[in-house]
Each structure stands twice: as C-alpha cells, then as structure tokens.
Amino acid sequence: MGEIVLSLAAMWGDISGLIAQVFHYHFMHNAYLAGTLVALSAGVIGYFMVLRGQSFAGHSLANVGFAGATGAALLGIPAIVGLFVAGVLAALGIQVLHPTAHAGHKSDVAIGAVFTAALALGFLFVFLSTSEYASNIYNVLFGNILGIGDSDVQVVIWSTLALFIVLFWIARPLFFLSLDPTVAAAQGVPVRLISLGYLVLLALVVAIAVQVVGALLIFALLVTPAAIAQTLTSRPGVAVLLSALLAIVFTWIGLAIGFFTPYPVSFCITSCAFGTYLLASGGKLIWRKRTYKRDQVRLSSQMKGAGNA
C-alpha cells in the first residue's frame, strides 16, 4: 500500500512539474487563454452550424477569411480585422444572392459563388504582396497560436464577449429556425434577420479561430466537436455544453503536445479531434449493432413463447 502511495505521489510530482513548465512562459499564458475562448466560441456556434447543415458555409467563410487576411496584410492593418470584415461582407453577399439561405442546402450555390470569388481575390492579394507580407500567409492557412500577443488576446476576449451577448439574444429563435424554418417563419420569427445575424457570428468565430488552427483546419474546432456531441446525445442543451467542452479539451491537449514536441499545434488539435470523432462514431456503431442483436433475440423469444402458447 505504501509503495502505491509513493508511486502516485511521484507521478503527481511529475505531472505538476510538467504543468509548471508549460505555464512558465508568458506566450503559453496567452495561448491557453486565447485558445480556451476561441474553442468555447467555436464549440457553441459550431453546434448550430452542424444542426443547420451549414458546414460548407463555415468552411467557405474560413477561406473567405484568407482573402481578408491577405488584404489586411497588403494594407498593413491587423489580420483579424481583415478576417472579420471579409466574413461580414461574405455573409451579406450570401444573404443577398440567396434570400432563403436559412434553408441550409439551398444556399450552396450562393456560398460557392462567394467562396470562389474570395479565393480569387485572395490570390490577387498574395500576388500583390511583398515577400514580407507573404510570409504571414502560412499563419493564416495553418494558424500560429503560440505567436499570439497581448493585443491579440484582448481582441479575442472582447470578440468572445460580443459573440455571447448577441447569441444569448438570438439563441431561442435561431434554434427554432434551425429545426423548422417554415414553421418559424409562420410563427413570426424574423428569418432573414436571424439568418444574417447567425452568419455574422459565424464570421466572427472564424476570424478569431483562424489564429488558432488556420483557415484550412477550421473544422477541427467548428465541426468536429459539434458532430461528436450530436453523436453522443440528442439533448440540445447537453450537446452544446459537450461541444464546447470537447473543443476546449482538444485545444488544451493540442497546446500541451505542441509545447513538448516539434509538431504544429494546429495539427495536434486536429488529430485529437479527428481521433475522438472516430472513437465516438465507432462506439455508436457497435452500440447500435449490439442493441439490434439484443432486440432480435428478444423478438425471437417472444415469437417462440407465442407459438408455444
């Protein structure tokens, strides 16, 4: 018994030492604070995105953000400003090109048109940029959370606060609209206004999440945690909380692995998210098969009992 206690104490000492080593550096304080806020925002807004079947919209806004970030670099302004402005303009464009964008798959054509136009514009900005500005494109595509400064953290804090204030106001009609847009419109829900507000919030989340995982890996925080949550539970409140919690855990683990290894943090976050999704999907498939076999055995027993009677 004493040896077990000593082993546990030694293990706890090692873990405490590793934690102290991680948080010894100020850049890791910024990375964990910003990463936690970004993951929380992405996990919550990502649930609505998956519920509405608009994963393509989230991916497109991330790529639209690429044009915004490269344009911001060309003008010498903060990248997050370009990311958000481009996202808002894209949201307006989607809404104008297809007024019924709230209907999910019906807006794919409008989203695709905005998506391709933004990619072409981003390529133009890259062509016009100097080598100094072009060197930042890698961070836009794949993220650089370990390079987040104090000013970036302040932007993330205020952006997260604004997002949850607006989301708290529109959460119930947005959920109603996401489940049944036709009935929601008949009940007087301002469909176009809520849909546009949701797209603007999604653009804001994309703008701050690009700093963590980059435009190409944005699904790691926006889609995967929400998809896992919906796989594990059908209760909306529990699913939202679980999605946010999973996004935070993936970010924390990814930051820790990225600190102790030479691998990029965004890769570590994405790998954790994808691996967990595979486990959740595989576990649910196994559970369904076992449930089906159990029901078949029960039905067979009932039929035999009825035949004997």
Image (spheres, rainbow, N blue to C red):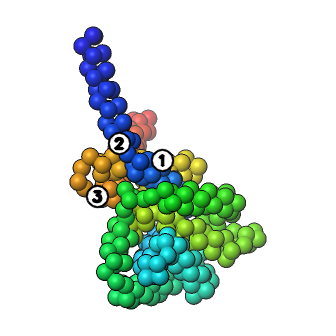
Quadrant occupied by the C terminus: top left
x%, y% of residue 238? 55, 47
Please tell me which residue lies in front, 115 or 147. 147
Please tell me which residue lies in front, 29 or 196. 29
Residue at the disc numbered 3:
264
- Residue furthest right as drawn: 188
Location of residue 60 with respect to 282 vertically, above or below:
below
x%, y% of residue 91? 56, 78
Going from N to C along the chain, the mark reached first, 2 or 1, is 2
- Residues under numbered marks 2 and 1 in contact, where contact means CB atoms less than 8 Å apart: no
Location of residue 146 with respect to 29 vertically, above or below:
below
Q: Is residue 284 left or right of residue 156?
A: left
The amino acid type found where label 1 is placed reads Leu
x%, y% of residue 267? 30, 59
Q: Residues within 10 Å of mark 1 (few under 14, many from 20)?
A: some
Residue at the disc numbered 1:
245
Q: What separation in Å lies between label 2 and label 1 (alpha carbons)?
A: 21 Å
The reply to whether residue 283 is visible in this rendering is no
Quadrant occupied by the N terminus: top left
Q: Which mark is residue 22?
A: 2
